[in-house]
Amino acid sequence: MSQQGEPRILIVGAGFGGIGAAIELQRHGFRDITILDAASDLGGTWFHNSYPGAACDVPSHLYSYSFATRRDWLRLCSTQREILDYLHAVAHDYGVDRLVVPDSMVTSCRWDDAGRRWSVETQAGDTHEADAIVLATGQLHQPAHPRVPGIERFAGHSFHSAEWDHDYDLRGRRVAVIGTGASAVQFVPEIAEQAGRLVVFQRTGNWFMPRRNRAYPRPVLAAIRRVPGVQAFRRRFMFQYGESLTSMIRHPATLGRLGAARSAAFMRWQVRDPELRRRIWPDYTFGCKRILFSSAFLPALQRPNVDLVADAITEITPTGIVTAGGVEHEVDCIIYGTGFRTNDFMFPMEISGVGGRSLRDVWAAGPHAHLGITVPGFPSMFVMYGPNTNTSGGSIIVYLEAQAAYLRQALQLVRDRGAAAIDVRAEVEAQSDRETQARFAGTAWTRCDSWYRTQDGRIVANWPGYMREYVARTATLEPAEFELIPSAAREPQPA
Ligand code: NAP
């Protein structure tokens, strides 16, 4: 507690999760909040991912806080800059931007059994004491590089899409892109216009859906701005659209086939060349991996200066990339669009709970948490965008807001009962994990390998159902599911 008897809350991560949690807590009377972030400014994923063409493929009327909707989004899906500006504006309006301590990379969070609180250390050597910690570092923050022999010997320039080198001029260069996920499909059409030669290395094909994303025509902008209810209707519509994508993933043999047919028709229309079509065609069930929304990627592959290579990469040499069959593609620059180390969640942070137990050990067989938020033996530790809370068909902000309200209720309970901390009961977490895992049976997610799964095949990233179910399930915290840890002052003292 602070000197004023206020619980001290430390949030790690100043992205949509951390900022949303700070606003929610502040609105409910919590005053001692600090947000640490490794970056030099707030923004999280929207601070780091500044690659050309970076945008959110979830429409902005849904990809925004429900308490801070906007009527002036310029297009369906906003650019990285617009989203970052929005987050800055909301953080400023709610007075939480001043709580952010930038350049603070958290290295460890340790629960102190005697003191009944957390001790949080940063790389700079600062120590923060806290009654509760909120880990809002997300699932997609540690860039993953492929394990290819020779990768360290490449003598040209290279960088990851999440660490874009804006000082490197791609004009006229021979550029390789490894990966064709949601990031690559956004930046490939942009850099295809600059590079002299662009070779895109694809390991697995994707299912595409159209998304043109032109700026709204003026009458549409005016209607959203001026006609009451239009903006709210758009948000509800997009919510339902997201739920319909989830229904296709949940029912691959029926609704999923309709989605696959729509996607296939679009892809056939965009790619007429049968040879290229064969190379880009996905070989797994629609929806098993992320469905990609882009009307620009497949046309970019058909530019005269662009090649798509679907052969496996076997080696990287000082001068280029070698694929199966021994062909070497000589390039000046390699851009890794190879995604993130998703199963690692908030690691490499060292986190230890009751009795010094390491979270790494608890999660050795794959991460799991009650509703993705609380882990038994880690009192008053709350994870945002934690295990099994990713969405394949909706807006992560819907989940983050639900999590913020849930953890706020937990901390209100601690405050109201004069306790030190709150810990989810082990049997409650185990049961909810069993329920979550059982709900994946028969869904498209189980039908291929993806970043949603561990090597053993356990799905640890995604929520198995609909947004509305997660919101309903987290709406009211059930006190019986938790144990309160009494504050030291309330413990019976020895006579
Ligand atoms: P990603 O979806 O994980 O894609 C990584 C790509 O790299 C895949 O094509 C993958 O192929 C390939 N790859 C990985 N390791 C490889 C290797 N060793 N050799 C060859 N290819 C390799 O990563 P991302 O595109 O950065 O996107 C990550 C997530 O961020 C997305 O799924 C999404 O949730 C989020 N995101 C969202 C948006 C948005 O607009 N909302 C935009 C960007 C990113 P395989 O498919 O074979 O694994």
Image (cartoon, rainbow, N blue to C red):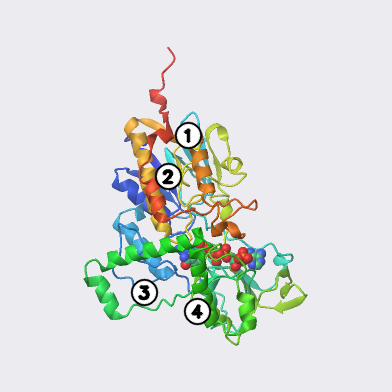
Taking the spot 53% from the left edge, 68% from the top edge, the residue there is: 183
Kindly report the distance in space between the C-alpha atoms of the residues bearing marks 1 and 4: 49 Å
Viewer-side residue, 458 vs 14: 458
- State the image coordinates of residue 289 (x, y, percent, origin top left): 56, 63
Image region (quadrant) for ligand 1: bottom right
Name the residue type under label 3: Arg
Quadrant where the N terminus is found in the figure: top left
Classify mark 2 as within 8 Å of ligand 1 or not, answering yes or no: no
Query: Taking 323 as reference, is 128 left or right?
Result: left
Kindly report the distance in space between the C-alpha atoms of the residues bearing marks 2 and 1: 23 Å
Query: Taking 477 as reference, is 71 left or right?
Result: left
Tell me the SS state at disc 3.
loop
Residue at image mark 4: 296
Kindly report the distance in space between the C-alpha atoms of the residues bearing marks 2 and 3: 36 Å
Compare marks 4 and 2 and give the one earlier in the sequence: 2
Compare marks 3 and 1 and give the one earlier in the sequence: 3
Name the residue type under label 1: Arg
Tell me the SS state at disc 1.
loop
Name the residue type under label 4: Ala
Q: Which mark is residue 10?
A: 2
* Label 4: how many Cα within 10 Å (few below 14, some 14–19, many 20+): some
Q: Quadrant of residue 356?
A: top right
Nearest-to-viewer mark from 4 and 2: 4
Classify mark 4 as within 8 Å of ligand 1 or not, answering yes or no: no
Taking the spot 70% from the left edge, 66% from the top edge, the residue there is: 151
- State the image coordinates of residue 173 (x, y, percent, origin top left): 62, 82
Residue at image mark 3: 75
